[in-house]
Image (cartoon, rainbow, N blue to C red):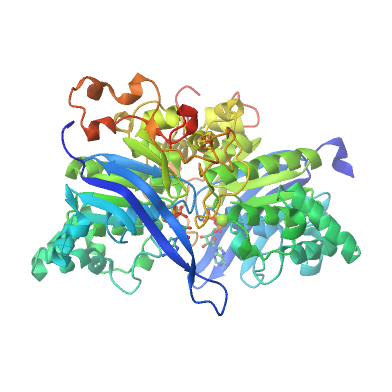
Amino acid sequence: MRDEQGGPVLSVRDLRVAFRTPRGLARVVNGLSYDVEPGRTLAIVGESGSGKSVGALALLGLLPGDVARISGSAVFDGYELIGRDEEEMRAVRGAGVGMVFQDPATSLNPVLTVGRQLVEALRAHASMPKDVARARAEELLAEVGIPDPRSRLEAYPHQLSGGMRQRVMIAIALAGQPRVLIADEATTALDVTVQAQILDLLMRLQKEHSTGVIWITHDLGVVAGIADHVLVMYAGRCVEEGSVDALFERPVHPYTRGLLGATPVVDDPRPARERDLLVTMPGLPPDPVELPEGCAFYPRCPVRADVRCRTEEPPLASVAGDPGHRAATFYTPEGV
Amino acid sequence: MAGEPPLVRASGLHVHFPMRSQMPFRRSVTEVVRAVDGVDLHVRRGETLGLVGESGCGKSTLGQALVRLIDPSAGTVEFDGVDTATLSASALRSLRRRMAVIFQDPFASLDPRRTVGDTIGEPLAIHGLHRGRRRRRARIGELMEVVGLDPDHRGRYPHEFSGGQRQRVGIARALAGEPEFVVCDEPIASLDVSVQAQVMNLLVRLQRDFGLTYLFVSHDLAAVRQVADRVAVMYLGRIVEIGAAPSVVDDPQHPYTEALVSAVPAPSPRKERARDRIVLGGDIPSPAAPPSGCRFRTRCPKVFDPCPHYDPVLQPVGGDDALGGDDAVGGDTGDADAAQGHQAACHLHGVRG
Ligand SMILES: Nc1ncnc2c1ncn2[C@@H]1O[C@H](COP(=O)(O)OP(=O)(O)OP(=O)(O)O)[C@@H](O)[C@H]1O
Ligand SMILES: Nc1ncnc2c1ncn2[C@@H]1O[C@H](COP(=O)(O)OP(=O)(O)OP(=O)(O)O)[C@@H](O)[C@H]1O
Ligand code: SF4
Ligand SMILES: [Mg+2]
Ligand SMILES: [Mg+2]
């Protein structure tokens, strides 16, 4: 195991995904590169349609092969994931890379008990007798904080609350002891109190097992609380990335700055009527079938000025004096 | 403003839904979902009252009962000083024009087969406003402009619009009857961050321009704090804390509010590292069988002896400032004024119930 001495457990380079659609080629992921380190959390943030889910599904071989064109590289533990067939990918999913999806209601099978689904997940990764798998399933439920795990094994998904179903999803994702866990909007549908429970749980399990986590979300508050490294996506591209502190304390890209300005904060002591209006960005992200030339954010950018903005695609370049912090913009904010 | 009666007032409000027995041969109604279970509340003219709480605690049911889309099982709803239960059908209909609802889901709440112009014009037709094709058309165009839509798009269908634009259609429809009171039921929940900000700013601007009164329902405490003058916190069918937004959110007095506030993620890594998150154990109990005594006791980190035995009532809490400077010296300490202060239903502030 090479990465025991450090180094990323997953390296993605220049990932691209395009879909054939009746209207033309939809270029949804356009050159994404990142590393996932063991025991660390990479957050991928961006608005709806920016390509967050598609980028993750591409790694797991879960996109419809007939319409999706995937290129680039994704090396997991020394093993190239892109271009594998379904059988090879099935071995990777779960055992190597686990995934928790946004909506537990649709990702659990409604007609099978929780126990049955867990046992199947366990036996898919390692051959073990049924009773051993069952005992392990009970342990897993206990591990994700479900009270009275033995009797919950007999429960059907609809008999559990949303928070409990999400815990079951996490238990299933962890069944194969994955080295990388991809959580796609895993707490978005939950109440903040339940979200706090799940975040707590995941961070504890991550620490215990040194799991590398990719956390996909549009909630900047959650990112600030759990991420080590953050990658901001716009129109299928990384527009800014850096340590969580760099991103929140010293954002450079006008889109990142816009997202932060649009997010209301709880702890501003002023009454609502004395607060400023939130910062808004006009318009919508571009259609992936008709990506603009130049910077994809140009049509909505409040500070566009540089003549190159409309004609040249800004490269992802290091921010001076801030190691590991990179942004794809021709704009330099004051004081940076 | 101090002496003016509230625009909306609920007293002893209950909304119970019968739940049919799951047993095949028993037809009797066995259980009742106590969605709203004893709420006293008022909304002042021109203010925004935020309503927060976990999924299923009864926020939407309360909002709909306030605009009489749902009939209360018990208790009263007064609008502008009139008990809505005493009104004739036609009087209730004309009262309805003065209230409106903006629904949560801009995808489900619009009829896919109607043009957005027809959807926005619907309340005009129902209430017989702006009669005549030309005038109605002009009014629809005006409403679209107010919410930032292009009037030339009136002939389009909902699927041709983005989520934020559909929510604007819902807002334009709600405004069509020129309501005084608008229940905004999770108006931003399904939208992207930048679009959420657009819609929140729009609601604030409309309130300023038209003097609207809002009940702003949301499970997003940061969004509520951004727009609400006062905040009510709901748990299992009850209001457990209410008061001026800065006092309730910045200095919560009920253990549930405290947990709720502590769980809201702040978009700042520095603050996140410094924070002590209160992680509640357990699940929300069923609203069909709320716990005895204090409903929050099964999850409360501060539960103590009286909690299972006495059902706490709202009582004044917080420092003097919570009573609201003006009103404390205002002299006229009528009912409405006393209720301006910060209140919480918890025995930690004295066992009352
Ligand atoms: N099978 C497909 N065929 C064509 N286009 C697709 C397909 N799957 C996804 N897309 C498009 O890819 C784009 C990116 O989708 P994706 O689900 O990755 O967004 P996202 O960033 O995860 O958004 P959200 O926050 O809403 O989950 C969207 O424009 C979507 O319509
Ligand atoms: N028509 C109905 N018949 C039966 N039960 C209902 C009905 N409407 C709501 N309920 C129940 O009443 C309770 C309160 O529901 P309500 O929709 O008011 O909650 P909420 O606070 O708005 O939740 P959310 O945040 O999920 O929108 C829930 O348990 C719900 O299942
Ligand atoms: S009354 Fe008791 S159980 Fe209820 S909130 Fe207060 S301390 Fe907690
Ligand atoms: Mg997605
Ligand atoms: Mg609701």
Q: Nearer the viewer, residue B33 or B132?
A: B33
User: Seen in the image, is A157 located left or right of residue B2?
Assistant: right
Number of numbered discs present?
A: 0
Q: Is residue A240 visible?
A: no
* Residue A79 percent coordinates (x, y): 82, 54
Q: Is residue B297 left or right of residue B229?
A: right
* Image x and y of residue A21, in percent: 53, 70
Above or below A26: residue B24 = below
- Is B316 left, or right, of B267 in this rendering? left
Q: Quadrant of residue B109?
A: bottom left
Q: Position of residue B283 (x, y in %)?
A: 60, 49
> Looking at the rendering, which quadrant does residue B52 occupy?
top left
- Using the rendered view, name the quadrant where residue A63 is placed: bottom right
Residue in the image at 43% along x and 50% along y? B237
Is residue B225 at all visible to an observer of this figure?
yes
At 35% from the left edge and 25% from the top edge, which residue is drawn? B322
The picture places residue B101, in percent across and down from the top left corner, at 29, 56
